């Protein structure tokens, strides 16, 4: 680390958290190997009650790697994964890495256009996909490099009794089965390939720490998605930073809930790498379902829960109403969107555990900052830099000029978790990674004298009206205080004097917000130029897979509606 950078935040670290971590010289393959050796009989994966031990997981990964090798997958090849959370996803992830190949994660709910763009961009020849979306991927074969589609049947990972129940001649059973699996004519069967394969030879070359492990697409909320290149060292070091951040964790004793999608950077690191690194049991959910999650709490209580604010609110409220005990959840970390202090208070009153907010980007593997897991945490901020991580707050127009504490500016990050660049995009890489290793985040933040950071907004979503800067998040906070408003998204639309501030709001149940009343409420908290010129009531707001509001889509909808 550059000792010329001041680090006032170190004073706020929880007891036992080191200032630095040593970047790993081993790969993610070694991470799983070590976990399988240390925790062989321990349950690694739980899927609706079906369990897989670490020994079994390592064996399945070896067989899956051999199956993929026979399909021609080799070192440096990209392999597309288009899967929800399931045991096969975990096996496929580590099997691809074992061959020295590169995982490319995709959202199985993508449209054909979104998926085809990404498949064409990275050039994978083999795709391992949920059988429900196999026809969609097969439809992209002619426009991409994909030659082989391997279909995964989620129901094959269920406990035997649940698989039998899905075959009952009942409408509910048929509906559940149709939601989990579907025909995939022309695709190879993942289960048959893996069952027929012997374990990959131990002598097969393994990847090194600086080899590319993952292409993770990002930028979907601000522009055309592009693949962030993340190495084994990036991802493994970020898992180690996360482990160091919570010294109270007990290796081989924790239970982590995968309610976040594994195909997203947040869920991938916290569940696929961090979880394996501490020998935790990972409880997998194909998607967040309140009833299924509470059922799992009774069966296998969580001790560490990474999630987003809406999940904490729903779980805590339902647990209190239904008498479900959440006291096992000692630690919880929230990301991807602002964590309201009221949500922290609710969760901690119900669980008795700590809930802290963090910050990250796909480009930082993804976690870069977090609140201390201690009384030093400060709700309303995203915390302080992780071990071995430096930050600067700079003038967005001149990144060489630093801002003073309390002044808003662009956040720069430097550390061993920072990515190598964007796949086949040298110009965008150069614009994002400065020559001295600093990453431009595109986020406007304010840091106090102790180094705690508060996110103001994204530079690309800044609204300029009448020559004044308006940050959407600030206006959205004011809108949520208005009577009858449950949620809001603020965007800039073309107007007579540059951009106009326009709000899309979701009404509280039974309410019918009046535009004039909403604007009047905003005037109590905002300067006149920040008050929305128009307020449009909508049924809902478009969101990403982890619940972040997609302002770009809000803007497009408002433009289309005139």
Image (cartoon, rainbow, N blue to C red):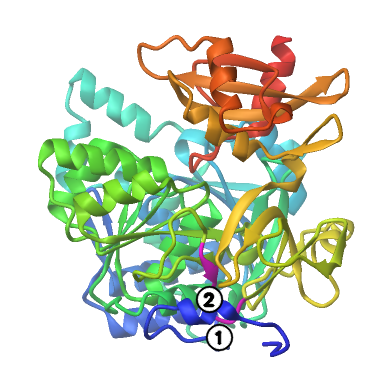
Query: Can you name the residue that lies furthest to the front here?
Result: 524
Q: Position of residue 411 (x, y in %)?
A: 70, 62
Nearer-the-camera pick, 233 or 338: 338
Q: Position of residue 473 (x, y in %)?
A: 61, 39
Q: CA distance from mark 2 to mark 1?
A: 7 Å
Q: Position of residue 485 (x, y in %)?
A: 46, 22
Within 10 angstroms of label 1, few (less than 14), some, or many (20 or more) residues? some
Question: On the rendered structure, is 58 left or right of 298?
Answer: right
Question: On the rendered structure, is 318 left or right of 421?
Answer: left
Rendered view: 552 above or below 377: above
Task: Point out the image quarter for the C terminus.
Answer: top right
At horizontal 43% and vertical 80% (from top left) the residue drawn is 244
Mark found first going from the N terminus, 2 or 1: 1
At horizontal 49% and vertical 77% (from top left) the residue drawn is 241
Secondary element at image label 2: helix
> Which residue, given by chain and number where applicable, does mark 1 sit on?
24
At horizontal 70% and vertical 83% (from top left) the residue drawn is 5
Within 10 angstroms of label 2, few (less than 14), some, or many (20 or more) residues? many
Question: On the rendered structure, is 401 left or right of 47?
Answer: right
Magenta-drawn stretch contains 417: no
Rendered view: 524 above or below 419: above
Q: Is residue 12 visible?
A: yes
Check whether the beta carbons of the residues at disc 2 and disc 1 lie within 8 A of each other: yes
Q: Which residues are magenta?
A: 383-389
Which SS does the magenta portion mostly show? Answer: loop
> Which residue, given by chain and number where applicable, does mark 2 sit on?
236
């Amino acid at each position: 680390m550059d000792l010329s950078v001041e680090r006032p935040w170190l004073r706020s670290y929880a007891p036992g958290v080191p200032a630095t971590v040593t970047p790993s010289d081993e790969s993610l393959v070694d991470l799983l190997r070590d976990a399988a050796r240390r925790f062989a009989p321990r349950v690694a994966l739980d899927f609706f009650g079906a369990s897989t031990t670490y020994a079994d997981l390592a064996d399945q990964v070896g067989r899956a790697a051999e199956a993929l090798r026979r399909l021609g997958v080799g070192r440096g090849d990209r392999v597309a994964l288009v899967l929800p959370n399931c045991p096969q996803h975990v096996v496929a992830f580590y099997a691809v890495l074992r061959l020295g190949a590169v995982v490319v994660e995709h959202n199985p709910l993508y449209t054909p256009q979104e998926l085809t763009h990404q498949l064409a961009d990275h050039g994978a020849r083999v795709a391992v996909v949920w059988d429900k979306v196999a026809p969609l991927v097969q439809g992209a074969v002619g426009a991409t490099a994909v030659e082989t589609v391997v279909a995964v049947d989620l129901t094959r990972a269920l406990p035997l009794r649940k698989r039998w129940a899905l075959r009952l001649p009942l409408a509910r059973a048929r509906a559940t089965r149709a939601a989990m699996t579907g025909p995939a004519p022309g695709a190879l069967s993942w289960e048959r390939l893996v069952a027929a394969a012997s374990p990959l030879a131990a002598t097969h070359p393994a990847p090194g720490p600086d080899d590319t492990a993952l292409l993770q697409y990002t930028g979907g909320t601000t522009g055309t998605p592009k693949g962030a290149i993340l190495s084994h060292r990036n991802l493994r070091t970020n898992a180690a930073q996360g482990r160091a951040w919570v010294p109270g964790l007990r290796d081989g004793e924790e239970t982590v809930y995968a309610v976040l999608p594994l195909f997203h950077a947040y869920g991938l690191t916290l569940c696929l790498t961090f979880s394996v690194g501490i020998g935790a049991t990972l409880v997998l959910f194909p998607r967040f379902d309140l009833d299924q999650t509470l059922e799992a709490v009774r069966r296998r209580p969580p001790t560490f829960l990474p999630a987003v604010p809406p999940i904490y609110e729903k779980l805590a409220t339902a647990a209190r109403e239904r008498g479900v005990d959440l006291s096992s959840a000692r630690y919880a970390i929230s990301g991807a969107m602002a964590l309201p202090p009221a949500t922290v208070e609710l969760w901690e009153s119900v669980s008795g555990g700590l809930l802290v907010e963090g910050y990250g980007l796909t480009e930082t593997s993804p976690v870069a900052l977090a609140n201390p897991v201690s009384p030093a945490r400060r709700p309303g901020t995203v915390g302080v830099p992780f071990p071995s991580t430096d930050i600067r707050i700079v003038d967005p127009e001149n990144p060489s000029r630093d801002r003073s504490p309390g002044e808003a500016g662009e956040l720069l990050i430097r550390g061993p978790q920072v990515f190598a660049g964007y796949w086949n995009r040298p110009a965008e890489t150069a614009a994002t990674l400065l020559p001295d290793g600093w990453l431009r985040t595109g986020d406007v933040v304010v840091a106090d004298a102790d180094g705690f950071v508060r996110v103001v907004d994204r530079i690309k979503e800044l609204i300029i009206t009448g020559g004044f800067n308006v940050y959407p998040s600030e206006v959205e906070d004011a809108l949520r205080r208005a009577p009858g408003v449950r949620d809001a998204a603020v965007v800039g639309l073309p107007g007579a004097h540059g951009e106009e501030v326009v709000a899309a709001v979701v009404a509280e149940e039974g309410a019918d917000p009046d535009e004039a009343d909403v604007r009047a409420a905003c005037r109590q908290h905002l300067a006149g130029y920040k008050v929305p010129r128009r307020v449009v009531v909508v049924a809902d707001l478009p969101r990403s897979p982890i619940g972040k509001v997609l302002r770009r889509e809000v803007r497009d909808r408002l433009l289309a509606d005139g």
